[in-house]
């Protein structure tokens, strides 16, 4: 069965990816919604115009990653779209941040994204699409979000490398580099009210980011960065010395 898999579907951008899925990929016959909070996934499933299955998983848990592998093996879906959106980012200097929070960022943003992609790839055929949610934080390290920005640099780098590996199989990979969005991410990460940078930057609307991302995916683009302001930042971060940009990009 033609299947989409969306991680981080219970809120924010992942939820928007689910809501806009059918309009962009009408061939999809079912969607697996992955996150930890099952009630939110169930509520979303009722709103969708495509049959949806809640798959409550903690993607930082090896047992739950194993459960996903078993579900894939039992159901043998034809995965036409994979959206790796689950992610988290905590504000704070490395030396003062709870090591468990540092580990949560690397476990979810890097390890889970990599292992979910690896688990799903055998179930993807020619024409399938992978969307990896990175961030403008991937363009240059952000002091006070050093680990988060480093995880997103990994996501962008992984996406581009994987895209090249999958070219022969005609499976496209797109990394989405959004600016700040007003989602639960800001409260959970202790960012809301505590970062001058987040107060100053223009915000991206998750609805528009999901729509723009799907357009970029269908146009087979390697990267999607919403808003002219962040496109300019991406360009400047490429041409200016990173030792200079890092001073301007502190969160
Ligand atoms: N908001 C921003 O300013 C911003 C900017 C650029 C990029 N991004 C990226 O956008 C993506 C989506 O973030 P968002 O802004 O939509 O934030 P969000 O509303 O907090 O969404 C995060 C999602 O990840 C899920 N998740 C968290 N921990 C998980 C775990 N251990 N296992 C499985 N799922 C887990 C959450 O669901 P449960 O809690 O139910 O598990 C939720 O569905 C992230 O990758 C983030 O890094 C965000």
Image (cartoon, helix red, strand yellow):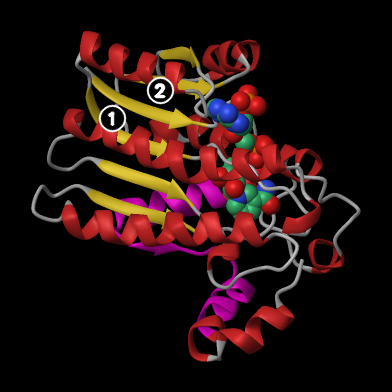
Q: Name the residue that disc number 1 marks.
A: 119
Per the picture, the main secondary structure of the magenta-coloured stretch is helix
Disc 2 within 8 angstroms of ligand 1 (CB): no
Q: Is the residue under label 2 in contact with that under label 1 (CB below 8 Å)?
A: yes
Q: Residue at the location (14% across, 56% down)? A: 167
Instruction: Say which mark, if any, is on residue 102.
Output: none
87 vs 212: above or below: above
Disc 1 within 8 angstroms of ligand 1 (CB): no
Q: Position of residue 217 (x, y in %)?
A: 34, 52
Q: Quadrant of residue 249?
A: bottom right
Q: Position of residue 25 (x, y in %)?
A: 33, 35
Q: Position of residue 179 (x, y in %)?
A: 64, 61
Distance of label 1 from label 2 (alpha carbons): 9 Å
The answer to which of 248 and 181 lies nearer the viewer is 248
Task: Rate crowding at label 2 as few (under 14), some (14 to 19) or many (20 or more) other CA atoms within 10 Å.
Answer: some
Q: Residue at the location (22% across, 14% down)? A: 73
Q: Which residues are magenta?
A: 209-235
Does residue 205 appear anywhere in the picture?
no
Q: Secondary structure at mark 2?
A: helix
156 vs 97: above or below: below
Instruction: Say which mark, if any, is on residue 65.
Output: 2
């Amino acid at each position: 069965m033609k299947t989409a898999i969306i991680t981080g579907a219970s809120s924010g951008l992942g939820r928007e990816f689910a809501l806009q899925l059918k309009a962009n990929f009408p061939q999809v016959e079912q969607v697996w919604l992955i996150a930890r909070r099952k009630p939110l996934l169930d509520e979303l499933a009722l709103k969708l115009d495509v049959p949806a299955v809640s798959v409550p998983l903690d993607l930082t848990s090896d047992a739950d990653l194993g459960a996903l592998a078993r579900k894939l093996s039992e159901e043998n879906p034809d995965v036409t779209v994979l959206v790796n959106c689950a992610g988290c980012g905590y504000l704070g200097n490395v030396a003062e941040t709870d090591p468990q929070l540092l580990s949560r960022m690397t476990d979810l943003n890097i390890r889970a994204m990599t292992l979910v992609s690896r688990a799903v790839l055998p179930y993807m055929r020619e024409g399938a699409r992978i969307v990896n949610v990175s961030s403008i934080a991937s363009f240059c390290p952000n002091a006070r979000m050093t680990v988060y920005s480093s995880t997103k640099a990994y996501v962008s780098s992984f996406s581009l490398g994987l895209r090249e590996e999958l070219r022969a199989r005609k499976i496209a990979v797109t990394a989405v580099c959004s600016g700040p969005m007003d989602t639960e991410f800001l409260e959970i990460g202790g960012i809301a009210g505590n970062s001058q940078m987040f107060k100053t930057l223009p915000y991206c609307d998750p609805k528009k980011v999901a729509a723009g991302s799907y357009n970029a995916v269908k146009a087979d683009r390697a990267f999607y960065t919403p808003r002219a302001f962040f496109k300019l930042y991406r360009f400047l971060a490429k041409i200016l010395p990173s030792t200079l940009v890092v001073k301007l990009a502190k969160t």
